[in-house]
Amino acid sequence: MKLTILILLLTLLTSCNGQNTYTSTKTTATQLGDTVTALSKDCWIVFQAANGDYWFGSNTNGAYKFDGEVLVQFSEKDGLPNNSVRGIQEDKDGNIYFTTMGGISKFDGKRFTALPPIKSNGPDENWKLQPDDLWFNTLGKGGENGPLRYDGKHLYQLEFPKHYLADDYYKQFPNNSWSPYDVYYSYKDSKGTMWFGTSNLGVCRYDGKSISWLYEDHLTNTPQGGSFGIRSILEDKEGKFWFCNTNYRYNIDSETSIEDGKSLITYTKEKGIEGIKPADGSASIYYMSVVEDDNGDLWMATYSQGVWRYDGKNVTHYSVKDGSTNATVFSIYKDQKGELWLGTHEAGVYKFNGKQFEKFELSAASKT
């Protein structure tokens, strides 16, 4: 009888303090996560897990989980490697993975587990194309010359083969703190082929057999000056590709061509989107992130000029306002219901209501 009462008391003590009863890897006596009432304003990432939970990644305050009723914040004190979250994804078993500035971490619902990368000894090591593998962007620490691949057991820091423009880049920018091979974006197409957008060396494709490149200056460098990099890749409903600006869309051939020792993606291109008139007078837009909605329309989220929708013929502009100013957008995301979300740098999370993007308010969401 005494033992039964003791167990009941311990159960009450661990469930009535306003926190989730997850177990920290640091100590089994410490609960994981804090119940909070609002998201951080710098939520860059939005992700929905298979079980319906929403996850939000902040640039400074860790990760948040929202199950429709309760919002829980996870941070370094809970085992997250770093409070700057740059990516969230899920494996087939429902484990959630976080790309942070302190490394990659796996969350199994009870604890965070750091995944130390195994550094490849060269560009011919550890490249594989397996259907259940997860791919991660580089962390921007310098010295990382390829994406990270996780096969369920090991995380591999891969290395690209030397790019034919690399020597010229290093001569021109000998003191840059970042690598021109930095992976800004990773994308799996309808055939299972992996694509990588780099900071300064264009687009890379890995088909399981070879690594090949597509480089055009206008994709990486803007007419106003400065490097934008390849921050988004999308294969549309017709099987054609879009790379971070609206100038062209690309018909990609499955074959790779070898020219003067260069492994190149074979492609043709057609005119992109007409009718866009950005406020700064640009002839085209460079977008941070892009998704295709359930109707096949493209939604392109720009840094400071809102979101553009393209239905194949016409374009529609949606401003994203934080009070009277334009919110700076980092990403656009489509959830399981086809609803669109925005992660921003300083204005919180937005959701499309069918007419415009409005701020996501936790109090209103909990009532629906």
Image: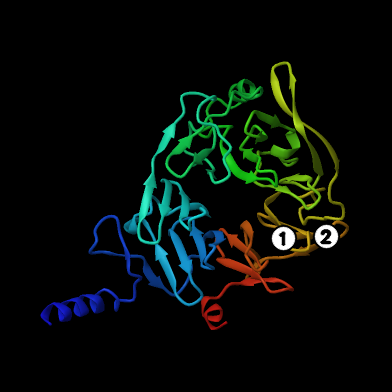
Q: Mark 1 belongs to which amino acid?
A: Val
Front one among 178 and 332: 332
Examine the image and state in which quarter residue 279 appears. bottom right
**As shown in the figure, which amino acid type bears the numbered disc 2?**
Asp
Q: Position of residue 2 (x, y in %)?
A: 11, 80
Is residue 221 visible to the viewer in this orientation of the structure?
Answer: no
> Image check: 278 left or right of 339?
right
Residue lying at 72% horizontally and 32% vertically, measured from the top left: 215
- Quadrant in the picture for the C terminus: bottom right
Q: Quadrant of residue 73?
A: bottom left
Q: Residue furthest left?
A: 2
Question: CA separation, marks 1 and 2?
Answer: 13 Å
Report x, y in % for residue 332: 64, 59
Instruction: Kindly identify which residue carries mark 2.
Output: 311
Q: For residue 24, which quarter of the picture?
A: bottom left
Q: In the rendered view of the protein, which quadrant contains the N terminus?
A: bottom left
Q: Secondary structure at mark 1?
A: strand
Residue 230 appears left or right of 59: right
Q: Find residue 161 and report its horizontal and vertical position in percent.
A: 59, 25
Residue extending farthest top: 260
Residue pictured at 33% horizontal, 69% vertical: 21
Above/below status of 344 relative to 251:
below
Marker disc for residue 307 = 1
* Within-10-Å neighbours for mark 2: few <14, some 14–19, many 20+: some
Mark 2 lies on a secondary structure that is: loop
Does the CB distance between marks 1 and 2 fall below 8 Å? no
Residue 182 seen in the figure: yes
Judge the density around disc 1: few (<14), some (14-19), many (≥20) Cα neighbours within 10 Å. Answer: many
Q: Is residue 11 above or below residue 149?
A: below
| Residue 109 percent location from the top left of the image | 40, 61
* Label 1 vs label 2, nearer the camera: 2
